[in-house]
Structures are given as structure tokens and as C-alpha cells.
Image (cartoon, rainbow, N blue to C red):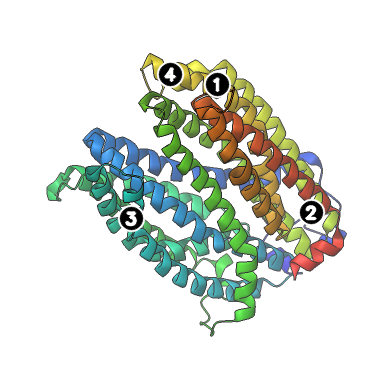
Amino acid sequence: MASSTNPRVQPSDSAPASQAPTASFRNEAWALCRLGVPMAATQFFIMGMGFLDTAMSGNYDSVHLAGVALGSNVLWPIFMLFTGCTMAVTPIAAQLVGAGRTDEVGIVVRQALLVAACLAALAVALVLNAAPLFAFFEIDPAAADIAERYLGAAAWGLPPVMVYVVLRYASEGLGRTVGPMVIVGTMLLVNAVLNYVFIYGAFGAPELGGEGCGWATAIVMWCEFGAMIVLSRFRYFRATGLWHGFERPDWRRIGHLLWVGLPIGLSSFVGMGLFALIGFLVGRLGVVPLAAHSIAGHINWATFVIPMALGAAAGIRIGFFVGAGDLAAARHVAKVAIAISLGYALAVSAALVLLRHGLVAIYSNDAEVTGLAAGLLILIAIYQVFDDLQGTATGALRGYKDTRAPMLYTISGYWLFSLPLGMALAYGFGEVSALGVYGFWVALSFGLALVAIAISLRLYRTARNPERIMRLAR
């Protein structure tokens, strides 16, 4: 059967997937690690680029740092929204490979590229018209000007990076996660050099400050595109027939891509959007709370990368087994992934509590900031358990193409529960004293707990519902 074309996600070397015995916990954990570790490294490299942008623009000038931060709060939520819409390529490709229909993956990817081209045009339009948003929040004119120039430069990279992302998702759906990791790891170094050149005006280049950070970002996006085009010529990609020619738009396939992918994009957008909005709201509390909030959020994101990658790896494995008709093996993957995620979360939570003072000291030597941030890490240690659980469960559900329910849970838990509760606790209401920045994180913890429980129950029920699985797999 066609599963032999992809040994990385193949359940057995000697038996059809539908007849292969369920792997042991240890073997399945190892399979998830082989897929997930490169994906986690990819996310860490992407975080590294954000860190470089912040650090290098901050060392240039504080106003330029503010401008880059503001521009990033516009660029990356939009990027996550539109690239999330094409993330459906990963579970669709995994299910096709599992079903022995690898040659159809190329058709799906080509249709996804058409979708990406349209979304890229819309993304560019939104990014280039962010000025009213800055005016609405009464952002300092100097910082807003730098943010607009940063976005004007970075926008040039959005069309190629949308193509890159589709091909990356396809590679991951085929069970090949090392190539994308190598590309992003290389681009981290390229980004550092280009930031130095364009921010500070090195080697005869113009000194552009925060705007230069935008040009560096755009060039890196083009480099990622070029590297992924090269990777798409590798043998495992050629088996999909990707470059055998383009068809007219297939509205049925495009509709299916958006049916699965749009909820993913919206979930990513509302999550990032909420944290961006809370950042603005915390800013009203003062510089110290905002600095502490930023440190806590960065540490939380760094620890979340691994369970997020674990969920993505589980989604690939589950998608393959669903395509192969081995629902018991798919269910086993989900069990192993959730067990690993919970074990990791408990270990990291303990580390956050025990090492909180040393961790925050890495970011600041201001005693007031580090004291507040260390207190927030105790809340994040609780938040961590639910965050890791929902991240892994959400990724596993994507393997079943079950994406709409998690989106609804996320919107409800974050925007309808956490945000109003956080504002009430942070600023005070009635007889309740204001908790400041702590109020937002208390509310986020409660909201995320509800989301994590709801998504985990959804995974439990979907994994045991063959009728739902087959309906979603069509």
C-alpha cells in the first residue's frame, strides 16, 4: 500500500495499517518525538527571530523598539489568521498518505496555493492600512510612524511567505519535519545579519532603525520561499506530483480546505488578538506591570512550544491512521500525546515555581519588575497545565479534521469569559479590590481551564466516534 512511501509515519513495515498492532507507549512516544522535536525547534527559531527584532531595535532606540513592537502586534496576528486558513493542508495530506493516495496531495497543495495567493493580497492590504488602529489607541505619533514604516517594508514579504507556509504544511503532513526546521534555523542567522545591516546601517547600507527591521523581515520571507521551493523538488515531494501543472480552481477542494482551515486561523487569531489587547490594557496600569506582564508572557510562550509541537505531531500521526482506517491506532496516539503533555506540564510548572526568581532576572535587573514578574510565574505554573493540555488536544483534533468545535470553545473561553473577568479583576468592581496585572492572569487561568476541559472532552468523544471521524474525513 502507499504508506510505504512515507516510512516516518508508517505504522508497520510488514502489515497494512488497518491490521497493524497498536504500538507500545514507548514506541508511539518515540514516533511522536521524531516528528515533534523538529517542529518544536522550528517554533523556537521563529521565536528567536522575534527576540532578535526586539533586542536589536531596542538597542538602537526605545522609540524604534516601541514602533517595531506595535507593528508586530499588527503583522503577526494577521499572519497567523491567514496562514492558519491553509494549515488544513497538514491533516488532509496526512490522511491522503495514510489512505494510499499520496499522488492527490499535490492537487490539494496547488489549490491551497491559490487560496494563499488571495489571502496574501488581503493581508498586504490590511497591513498597509494600520494607521487608523494606531490613531484609535492614541499611540505616540513617533512610535506610530515607525510602526507604519516597519509594516510598509515587511508587507513586501507576505506574498512569498504565504507560499512558503503552504509548502511547509505539506511537508509536515507528509511526515517530513526536519527540512522546514533547517530552513528556519538558517533564516534565524540570516535575520540577525540583515537586522544589523539595515537597523544600524552597516556595510554601507542605509541606517533605517525600526524600518530596517521590517526590510530584514521581508528579505527573510523571500529567502524562506526560495529555500522551500528547493525542498519541494526533493524525492518525497515529487511523489505527490506537486509540480505537474496547475488546474483551474477546484471549488470543492477549496471549500474543504477553508472548512477545515478557517477555524484554525480564527483560533490562532483570537488567541493572539486577546493577548495583544491585554497588552494594551495592562499598559494602562503602568510601565512596571507592562514589563512584568511581557516577561511572564514570553516565558509562558517559550514553555508552550513543546506541547504545541507535540499536538501537531499527534495530528499528523492521527491523520495518517485515520486515512489508513486504523481508528484504534489513532486513538492510541491521542492517549500517548495527552499523557506526555500532562507529564511535561507538571514538570515545567514545578520548575517555574522553584526557578521563578532566576528566570525573570534574565530579562530585567529592576527589582520592582522582577518581583512582580516572579509572582506572575506562580499563576503561570497553574495556567501552564491547562495551556499545555488544550494545545496538545487541539493539535490531535486537527488530525481528525475536527477544528470548528475547538474554535468555538476558544472564542467563548477567551473573549466571552476571560477578557471581561480579567478587566473586572484588574481594575476592580463593586467591593472587589483591583488586582492589577494579576487579575488578567487569574482570569486567563480560569478561562483556559474551561477551554482545556471542553477541548479534551471533545477529543475523547471524537476519538470514540467512528461515524464522526468518517464524516469529517470526507
- Amino acid at pointer 3: Pro
Q: Is residue 371 above or below residue 323?
A: above
Q: Quadrant of the C terminus?
A: bottom right
- Residue 80, given in percent of the width and then of the height, sits at 49, 54
- SS at circle 4: helix
Going from the N terminus, do you reach mark 1 or mark 2 first? 2
**Furthest-front residue in this view:** 430
Going from the N terminus, do you reach mark 3 or mark 1 first? 3
Q: Which mark is residue 144?
A: none
- SS at circle 2: helix
Residue at (36, 45) in percent of width and height: 137
Going from the N terminus, do you reach mark 1 or mark 4 first? 4
CA distance for labels 2 and 4: 44 Å
2 and 4 marks in contact (CB < 8 Å): no
261 relative position to 63: left or right: right
466 vs 410, nearest the viewer? 410
361 vs 129, nearest the viewer? 129
45 vs 411, nearest the viewer? 411
Please give the count of numbered marks on the rendered protein. 4
Question: Where is mark 2, residue-wise?
Answer: 330
Going from the N terminus, do you reach mark 3 or mark 2 first? 3
Q: Which callout, 1 or 2, points to the residue nearer the camera?
A: 1
Whether residue 85 is visible here, answered yes or no, is: yes
Q: Which mark is residue 132?
A: 3
CA distance for labels 1 and 4: 23 Å
3 and 1 marks in contact (CB < 8 Å): no
- Amino acid at pointer 4: Thr
Q: Is residue 14 above or below residue 338?
A: below
